[in-house]
Amino acid sequence: MLNFPTARYLAVKVVMMPRDTNAVGTIFGGVLLSHIDQAGAVGAIHEIRSQGWPTPALVTVAMNGVEFHEPVAVGEVVSFWTQVTRIGRTSITTHVSVESEREDGPKRVTEAEVVYVAIDKESPVRKTMTIRGEETS
């Protein structure tokens, strides 16, 4: 049986670059959202595989509770930590905590809950599948 939330998993680590900045010189929120989406999927797949289940194709269905706590600067190394908080019949939810490495230690700068659904990518209508690899009716 799984205990929720699962252990933290470092899904993505990125150096923020000048191309990622907005007009005020900090990192675009959309850049962080893109990395959050990728990290959440990586963390979800990691947990699914660690349970020994088949690896499904996952698509994002919701990004909930996004909070930008502090701006991120060019050159900062940003870590995207995930924890699976729920596994449903066809969906999996991950909490993504974004931390920037700063002189005084890691600082949480952003967080979000991301929900993914498992789909049959061979189906022309993208029929959902159960997380454990069985087709739904």
Image (spheres, grey):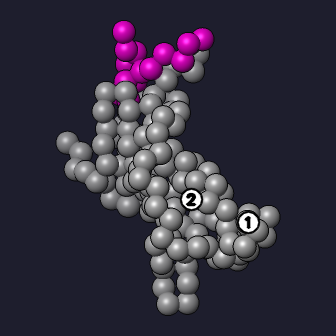
- How many numbered circles are shown? 2
**Image spot of residue 75 (x, y percent):** 70, 77
Judge depth for marks 2 and 1 and give the one in front: 1
Above/below status of 76 relative to 91: below
Percent coordinates x, y for residue 59 in the rendering: 53, 33
Of helix, strand and loop, which mostly describes the magenta segment?
loop
Examine the rendering and report whether any part of residue 17 can be seen.
no
Q: Where is residue 125 in the image (x, y as percent from the top left)?
A: 56, 13
User: Looking at the rendered structure, which numbered label has been put on residue 115?
Assistant: none
Q: Horizontal and vertical percent for residue 65?
A: 41, 53
Residue drawn at 47 percent across, 45 percent down: 63
Q: Name the residue under label 2.
A: 12
In the image, residue 90 above or below residue 48: above
* SS type, badge 2: strand
Residue 65 seen by the camera = yes
Residue 32 appears left or right of 21: left
Question: In the rendered view of the protein, which quadrant contains the C terminus?
Answer: top left
Badge 2 crowding class, 10 Å Cα cut-off, few under 14, some 14 to 19, many 20 or more, is: some
Q: What stretch is highlighted in magenta?
A: 124-137
Q: Does the magenta stretch include residue 127?
A: yes
Q: What residue type is labelled 1?
A: Asn
Quadrant for residue 7, please give it: bottom left
Q: What residue type is labelled 2?
A: Val
Q: In this view, does 51 lie above or below 107?
A: above
| Few, some or many residues within 10 Å of mark 1 (<14, 14–19, 20+) | few
At horizontal 44% and vertical 31% (from top left) the residue drawn is 117
Q: 64 or 91, which is in the foreground?
A: 64
Per the image, the residue denoted by label 1 is 22
Pointer 2 or 1: first along the chain = 2
The extreme right residue here reads: 19
- Report, in whole angstroms, how far the alpha carbon at label 2 lies from the one at label 1: 22 Å
